[in-house]
């Protein structure tokens, strides 16, 4: 029962964050799903549910999508996806896997808090897309490079949310296929994802309500807290300090 309760809490909170911020599900869900699932199970459950969320929300917010950047992200991600699968298949140590994820999150948080700034260019769009594709198939988290890039270019939260969700539709679908082909899948993954769907939709409803009143400043603070908490938790867990 404790495991079921933890699972419900993870999915509900992550769904709320995904809907209200556009990036929160994978960042929140993957590290904590690793508490109760094997790495490939946690990643595939995250990918399946994230894909469902993106499909559910995309039509409502499609007017805010930046299709030029979306196209560049998509093309860039094609190079990162196979590299991510290779890295994931090469990892044998669970703690090393968690440590790598925690370091990525903490570095991202420090850059954001340090008011990281960057100008959007065509080549940078391709690089960000490639790095995001790499992180999707390796750790199931495409959001960090997108979040850093969009925040560094002062992108409006509506545009950030819509463009990332549109990109997720492509990258999560491709990554799921790649995971299933090269890593395999199992009954636990699909049953857990099925049971989580009602919780996801509850989170979507609550997240939409929150998004209506959250302003840009609160949005940034929420981003920092989410990334810092998740990164520190995973770091301590990987070093067996919890």
Image: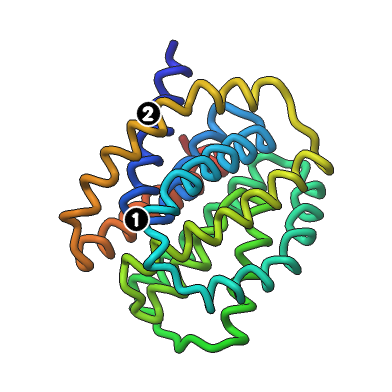
Vertical side of 129 occupied by 139: above or below: above
Would you say the residues marked 2 and 1 are in contact, meaning their CB atoms lie under 8 Å apart?
no
- SS under mark 1: helix
- Which residue was labeled with disc 2? 9
Q: Residue at x 22, y 48 (%)?
A: 210
Locate residue 58 relative to residue 175 in the image: left or right.
left
Badge 1 density bin: few <14, some 14–19, many ≥20, Cα 10 Å:
many
Quadrant where the image shows the N terminus: top left
Vertical side of 5 occupied by 42: above or below: below
**Percent from the top left, x then y, of residue 86?**
81, 54
Q: Residue at x 56, y 28 (%)?
A: 193
Vertical side of 28 occupied by 3: above or below: above
Vertical side of 87 occupied by 188: above or below: above
Camera-near label (2 vs 1) is: 1
**Percent from the top left, x then y, of residue 188?**
65, 21
Q: Quadrant of residue 48?
A: top right
Q: CA distance from mark 2 to mark 1?
A: 18 Å
Locate residue 224 relative to residue 211 in the image: left or right.
right
* Model colouring: rainbow
Locate residue 84 relative to residue 194 in the image: left or right.
right
Q: Quadrant of residue 201?
A: top left
- SS under mark 2: helix
The dot on residue 21 is: 1
Q: Is residue 20 visible?
A: yes
**Percent from the top left, x then y, of residue 79?**
75, 69
Sequence-wise, the earlier of marks 2 and 1 is 2
């Amino acid at each position: 029962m404790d495991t079921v309760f933890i699972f419900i809490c993870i999915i509900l909170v992550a769904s709320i964050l995904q809907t209200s911020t556009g990036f929160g599900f994978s960042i929140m869900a993957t590290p904590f799903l690793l508490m109760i699932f094997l790495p490939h199970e946690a990643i595939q459950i995250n990918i399946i549910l994230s894909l469902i969320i993106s499909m559910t929300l995309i039509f409502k917010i499609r007017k805010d999508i930046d299709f030029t950047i979306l196209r560049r992200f998509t093309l860039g991600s094609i190079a990162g996806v196979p590299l991510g699968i290779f890295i994931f298949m090469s990892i044998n140590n669970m703690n090393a896997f968690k440590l790598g994820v925690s370091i990525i999150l903490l570095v991202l948080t420090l850059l954001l808090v340090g008011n990281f700034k960057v100008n959007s260019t065509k080549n940078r769009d391709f690089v960000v897309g490639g790095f995001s594709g790499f992180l999707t198939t390796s750790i199931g988290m495409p959001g960090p490079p997108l979040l850093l890039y969009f925040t560094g270019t002062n992108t409006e939260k509506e545009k950030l949310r819509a463009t990332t969700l549109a990109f997720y539709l492509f990258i999560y679908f491709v990554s799921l296929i790649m995971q299933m082909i090269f890593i395999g899948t199992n009954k636990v993954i699909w049953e857990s994802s099925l049971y989580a769907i009602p919780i996801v939709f509850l989170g979507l409803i609550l997240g939409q309500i929150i998004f209506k009143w959250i302003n840009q400043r609160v949005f940034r603070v929420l981003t920092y807290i989410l990334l810092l908490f998740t990164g520190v938790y995973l770091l301590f867990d990987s070093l067996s300090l919890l």
